[in-house]
């Protein structure tokens, strides 16, 4: 039984699957011949031919070289990557001398897919700041568009390791990556993907197929030619937010919603509406932008009018900027009711951005065309008052698609939203729920906890001055909430009482220092109004450095001195918003009341200190500020000083199943922690841990089997995540010693059985507070130093025989010792690689139960004894490391005169220094090696393959 390897079990399968869907495979040597050198990114002859074919009369033999040179001059930056995407999408021009004008050029035919040339290669070498070799690179029309990195399924956290590799490649090969638009990684089971240049939690996605472990289907659907062309034409988006250029790829739920909208308009006659619920944090604005762009390009719609409706002026400005940053043509922002009326009367074709309020008083039937598509953000807002009626009356034949980031509630407004956008048999045209979003890693779960009851608002005041009023008036937006609060005199008096604000500020400061700052994350305070923001700032500065916090609210010339003290300009707000997102800059706490409660995306935000009554949509929208994924952030936390979470049904009038997966009582975490600790007790009871001199060996012995290791690792990671959230809560006091012991066990398992951890990779799986725990405890941090490493020498068999541990522990320790020895000496002794492969084969046979523990130990001892003999033989041979490496292989195959033949082989290979990248040179080299090995009686092809594999290692 052969061991599982990256090449055989992943790369070879990928190659076959790609060939099976029509991608042409070009061997590396052939490709290098076409490229000419390692610094050439394009398959130049194919690119030149396709440029001329796709641009007749524009690109000719005379100017094709100039066009390709221009492509090479694109800056090797994220901005350059955006510029090249514009080239790919046909948005760039070339001057045509005959016509004396600029003409758009095409690099890809997006209409007729088979007019393009689809190819890929493996082991693609490229030289830039360094020379690197990528696993698989895919090309369209000779242009590199995707890097696909592979790992063996036996590698722990394989997808993360592959992603780390791509990050390195991007850093050292920018001249290649300025063209690559997306990447993929796989361990031969699942497929993950994302945009190049942006390697963040929020842009690392898993490709979904019906059977999540159907590897062939994943490859064939993700790399389907039509799918890849669609990805390049519309699924990659560049946008500028907070002056930073961002790059995204649409996720499955986004493309699914867009496709459903297009299908409804083009194919489903009699249906002219739909409701799309994509939970907060799932980039529905991006979905709307790309949807609008796709709609405007559909010929059957005959130059449609697309109207994007938002619920706030601030969002109108923001979405207008987003459309501009996307490069959307023909955008009009309705400046007033009259301006909107004029645009509709004059039959404007293109995109109109407006607030719902500008439809107020709009005449009926102002435009009766059917090719008007209205995309409404926060759809429930369109049901407020008569605004929705005015909109529908003015555009009676339009299509209406409502987008919402929250599920529709059970109130009258909610029922109205269903009626306005849904059908009896179809409440939602598409939905992407909170639990789906968490499972995909698009968002993290939210935990809420109530502060001390003495700080809460009296329930009667809260009911009379807030809940009842909000429900009676059907309020669904933050402006409406603020108006209610303005009238709530008793409520405001309680919330802004000096003593209360002082106590809460002190609590926030202590909580932030203990629970938030150690994670390297940030927080936000939501105060009842602008004055409360200023009061919190004054109080907080007594307990935290003033630079830690900033107030962000809208200024008013009528403000008193306290409010004026915290006025900031638009430019200052811009800087604050940007610097808050940076882990290395202040502020660390934002104090707000309305601004930044919607539309502000700061993944570093972890905790919300909530001291403002909110309800239904406004509450979900606000707390979703803390649900964005961020490295090593496992959840978002809300601390409720009002008491609104005391009665969740009162605060959130939604179906419980729509929100319960993403909004969890903090106390349940403690219950879950206890449950997991009990689960791990069951495992530990099976290990003899009483004898402290032998318990490490007993741990190694117990976790010798893969299934037991995986079970423990899964439970430990859940425990660690909860510890990260709870620490340093007093609740953990009874568990801390036991948790330290679990950390020790985890380190033993990881270090003994997952050898890449020798490079420090264990830190990827250790979260911040556990890492600090390890640093603070000598026993934890020095644990690995106590593990035995057998010295690989001639007496290794006696050393192992004398070791008073079980045979399983001997196997684990010996395997680890051999690997460490080989890793340390491989550069000077390349022949050790063949020994390493032999070791992996032995261990693989053990894992697959084709070999016993006793037999495995016996074989590993033989290998370990072989190493010092080989090293001594090399020293006395007088051969160079290259010559001895070839000699070692020849000797194993029983070749006579191995030493002199090794010298000849070394000389022949050195003279053919480009054989790895040139098929003809490799063919000639093989012929010469066959001649040298003419008298060999065995499988000469296999022997030559092994010699060339060794040559590749030496040349690297």
Image: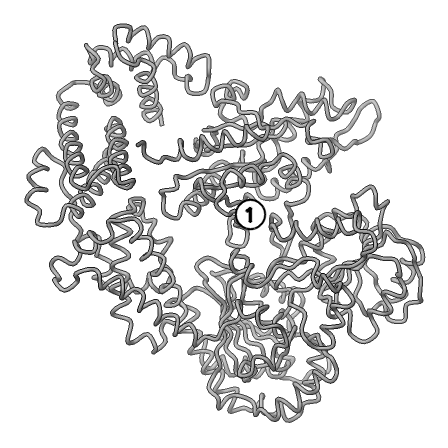
In the rendered image, residue 528, in percent from the top left (x then y), is placed at 61, 82
Residue 920 falls left or right of residue 818 = right
Q: Quadrant of the N terminus?
A: top left
In the rendered view, how is the structure colored?
one colour
Mark yes or no: residue 352 visible.
no
Where residue 813 sits, quadrant-wise, is: top left
Residues 50 and 527: in front is 50
Identify which residue, 855 or 763, lies in the foreground.
855
Quarter holding the C terminus is top left
Residue at the (14%, 45%) spot, across then down: 807
Q: In x, y percent, where is residue 618?
A: 65, 74
Asked if 59 appears above or below 249 in the picture, the reply is above
Is 738 situated left or right of 952 in this image?
left
Mark 1, secondary structure of its residue: loop
| Residue 72 appears in view | yes
Please state which of residues 385 and 433 is positioned toward the viewer in this rendering. 433
Q: Which residue is mark 1?
A: 210
Within 10 Å of the Cα at label 1, are there few (<14), some (14-19), or many (20+) other Cα atoms?
Answer: few
Q: Is residue 733 positioned above or below 35 on the image?
A: below
- The percent coordinates of residue 240 (x first, y second) are 64, 53
Q: Is residue 108 above or below residue 627?
A: above
State the image quarter where residue 66 is shown.
top right
């Amino acid at each position: 039984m052969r061991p599982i390897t990256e090449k055989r079990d992943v790369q070879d399968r990928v190659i076959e699957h790609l060939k099976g869907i029509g991608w042409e495979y070009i061997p590396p040597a052939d490709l290098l011949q076409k490229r000419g050198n390692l610094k050439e990114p394009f398959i130049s002859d194919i690119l030149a031919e396709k440029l001329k074919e796709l641009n007749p009369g524009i690109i000719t033999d005379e100017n094709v070289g100039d066009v390709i040179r221009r492509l090479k001059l694109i800056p090797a930056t994220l901005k350059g990557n955006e510029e090249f995407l514009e080239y790919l999408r046909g948005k760039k021009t070339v001057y045509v001398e005959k016509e004396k004008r600029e003409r758009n050029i095409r690099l890809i035919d997006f209409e007729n897919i088979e007019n393009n040339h689809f190819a890929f290669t493996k082991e693609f070498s490229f030289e830039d700041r360094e020379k690197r070799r990528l696993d698989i690179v895919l090309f369209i029309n000779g242009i590199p568009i995707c890097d696909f990195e592979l790992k063996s399924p036996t590698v722990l956290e394989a997808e993360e390791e592959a992603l780390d590799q791509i990050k390195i490649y991007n850093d050292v090969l920018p001249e290649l990556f300025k063209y690559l638009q997306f990447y993929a990684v796989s361990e031969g089971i699942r497929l993950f993907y994302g945009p190049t240049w942006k390697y963040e939690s929020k842009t690392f996605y898993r490709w979904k197929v019906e059977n999540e472990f159907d590897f062939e289907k994943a490859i064939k659907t993700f790399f389907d030619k039509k799918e890849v062309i669609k990805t390049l034409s519309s699924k990659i988006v560049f946008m500028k937010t907070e002056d930073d250029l961002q790059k995204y790829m649409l996720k499955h739920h986004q493309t699914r919603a867009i496709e459903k909208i297009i299908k409804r308009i083009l194919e489903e006659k009699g249906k002219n509406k739909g409701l799309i619920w994509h939970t907060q944090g799932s980039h529905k604005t991006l979905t709307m932008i790309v949807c609008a762009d796709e709609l405007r390009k559909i010929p059957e719609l005959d130059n449609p009018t697309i109207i994007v409706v938002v619920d706030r002026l601030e969002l109108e400005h923001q979405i207008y900027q987003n459309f501009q940053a996307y490069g959307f043509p023909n955008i009009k922002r309705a400046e007033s009711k009259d301006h909107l009326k004029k645009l509709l009367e004059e039959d404007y074709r293109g995109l109109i951005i407006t607030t719902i309020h500008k439809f107020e008083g709009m005449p009926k039937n102002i435009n009766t065309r059917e090719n008007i598509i209205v995309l409404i953000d926060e759809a429930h807002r369109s049901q407020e008052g008569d605004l929705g009626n005015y909109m529908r009356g003015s555009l009676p034949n339009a299509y209406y698609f409502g987008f919402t980031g929250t599920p529709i509630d059970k109130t009258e407004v909610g029922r109205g939203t269903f009626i306005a956008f849904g059908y009896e048999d179809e409440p939602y045209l598409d939905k992407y729920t909170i639990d789906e979003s968490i499972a995909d890693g698009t968002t993290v779960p939210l935990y809420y906890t109530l502060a001390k009851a003495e700080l809460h608002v009296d329930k009667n005041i809260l009911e009379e001055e807030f809940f009842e009023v909000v429900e009676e008036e059907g309020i669904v937006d933050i402006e409406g909430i603020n108006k209610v609060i303005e009238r709530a005199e008793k409520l405001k008096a309680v919330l802004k009482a000096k003593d209360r604000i002082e106590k809460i500020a002190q609590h926030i400061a202590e909580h932030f220092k203990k629970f938030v700052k150690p994670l390297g994350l940030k927080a936000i305070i939501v105060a009842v109004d602008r004055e409360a923001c200023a009061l919190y700032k004054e109080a907080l500065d007594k307990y935290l450095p003033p630079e830690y916090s900033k107030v962000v609210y809208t200024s008013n010339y009528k403000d008193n001195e306290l409010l004026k003290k915290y006025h900031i300009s638009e430019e200052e707000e811009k800087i604050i918003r940007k610097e808050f997102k940076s882990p290395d800059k202040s502020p660390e706490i934002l104090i707000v009341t309305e601004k930044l409660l919607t539309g502000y995306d700061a993944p570093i935000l972890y905790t919300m200190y909530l001291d403002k009554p909110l309800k239904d949509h406004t509450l979900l929208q606000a707390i979703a500020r803390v649900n964005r994924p961020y490295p090593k952030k496992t959840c978002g936390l809300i601390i409720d000083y009002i008491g609104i979470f005391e009665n969740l049904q009162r605060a959130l009038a939604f179906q419980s199943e729509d929100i319960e997966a993403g909004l969890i009582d903090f106390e349940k975490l403690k219950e879950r922690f206890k449950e997991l600790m009990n689960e791990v007790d069951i495992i530990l009871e099976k290990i003899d841990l009483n004898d402290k001199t032998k318990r490490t060996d007993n741990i190694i012995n117990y976790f010798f089997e893969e299934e037991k290791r995986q079970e423990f690792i899964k439970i430990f990671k859940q425990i660690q995540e909860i510890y990260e959230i709870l620490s340093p809560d007093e609740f953990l006091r009874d568990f801390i010693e036991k948790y330290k012991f679990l950390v020790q066990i985890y380190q033993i398992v990881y270090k003994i059985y997952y050898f890449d951890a020798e490079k420090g990779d264990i830190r990827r799986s250790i979260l911040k507070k556990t890492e600090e725990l390890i640093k603070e405890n000598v026993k934890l941090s020095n644990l690995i130093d106590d593990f035995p490493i057998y010295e690989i020498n001639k007496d290794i068999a006696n050393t192992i025989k004398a070791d008073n541990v079980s045979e399983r522990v001997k196997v684990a320790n010996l395997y680890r010792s051999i690997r460490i020895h080989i890793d340390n000496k491989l550069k000077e002794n390349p022949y050790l690689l063949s020994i390493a492969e032999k070791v992996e084969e032995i261990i693989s046979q053990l894992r697959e139960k084709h070999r016993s523990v006793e037999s495995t130990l016996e074989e590993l001892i033989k290998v370990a004894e072989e190493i010092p003999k080989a090293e001594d033989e090399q020293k006395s041979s007088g051969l160079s490391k290259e010559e001895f490496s070839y000699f070692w292989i020849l000797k194993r195959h029983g070749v006579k005169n191995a030493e002199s033949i090794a010298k000849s082989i070394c000389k022949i290979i050195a003279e053919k220094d480009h054989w790895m990248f040139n098929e003809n040179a490799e063919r000639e080299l093989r012929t010469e090696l066959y001649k040298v090995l003419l008298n060999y009686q065995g499988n000469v092809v296999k022997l030559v393959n092994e010699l060339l594999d060794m040559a590749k290692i030496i040349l690297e």
